[in-house]
Image: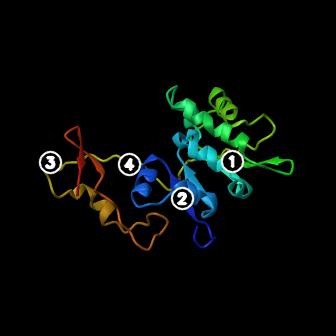
Amino acid sequence: MQKAGLTAIMINSDAIDAARRVGRRLWEEARSKVTMILVSPEELKSKECGVLLDTQVFYNRVYALGVDEAHLLYFWGADFRPRFRQIGYIRARLPSHGSMRTVLVAVTATLRAGRPKDCICSFLGLHEGKYHFIRSSNRRNDIQILFRNMRSGIKSTHFPELDWVLNSSMSLARDCSRREIDVSRLLIHAKNSPILADA
């Protein structure tokens, strides 16, 4: 991001509290000092967000609105939906560039067709035929899930059953020059009981 000249700021309740303790005012910084603002849905209903949207300097700089994990608009249930609905309202308040509304990019890896997709499109103010829906598989051909029986005991500190991974000469991770395997969160099965081994 820095090479492209982009700067970002995160605005959520924790970030606001931390900034306040050191004398920073994030909403003021967001007006003109950064190129990207990452805002939690809870903050979209705040007075400060409303003031930001009404500030001409900020309004003139808005180019796009991004929504990450867009499937949560549908799946997080009734308690969260009022906050998430603000995303659609925010989009309606953003500027138009000629005949085009502010660009909206919503991404998700798990959106299902039918009611979930229709609900999300409704939240975001997207109308059939007026947006591009790009589906790309999240299938990872470079990842395998292998199951091996472990013979080492529960209290073992040595796991020879893993030597085939840790001492392997086979090409892993697309021939990365450095081969490290994080075993600190390796789920092993010994005596039919799952054990979380911390290295």
N-term-proximal mark, 1 vs 4:
1
Q: Label 2 neighbourhood size at 10 Å, few (<14), some (14-19), many (20+)? A: some
Number of marks in the rendered image:
4
Q: Circle 4 sits on which residue?
A: 146
The mark found on residue 159 in the picture is none
How far apart are the alpha carbons under marks 2 and 4?
A: 40 Å
Whether residues under marks 1 and 3 lie with C-beta atoms below 8 angstroms apart, the answer is no
How far apart are the alpha carbons under marks 1 and 4?
A: 55 Å
Q: Secondary structure at mark 2?
A: strand
How far apart are the alpha carbons under marks 2 and 3?
A: 48 Å
How far apart are the alpha carbons under marks 1 and 3?
A: 64 Å
Q: Circle 1 sits on which residue?
A: 54
The nearer-to-camera label among 2 and 1 is: 1
The mark found on residue 9 in the picture is 2
Q: Secondary structure at mark 4?
A: loop
Colour mode of the rendering: rainbow
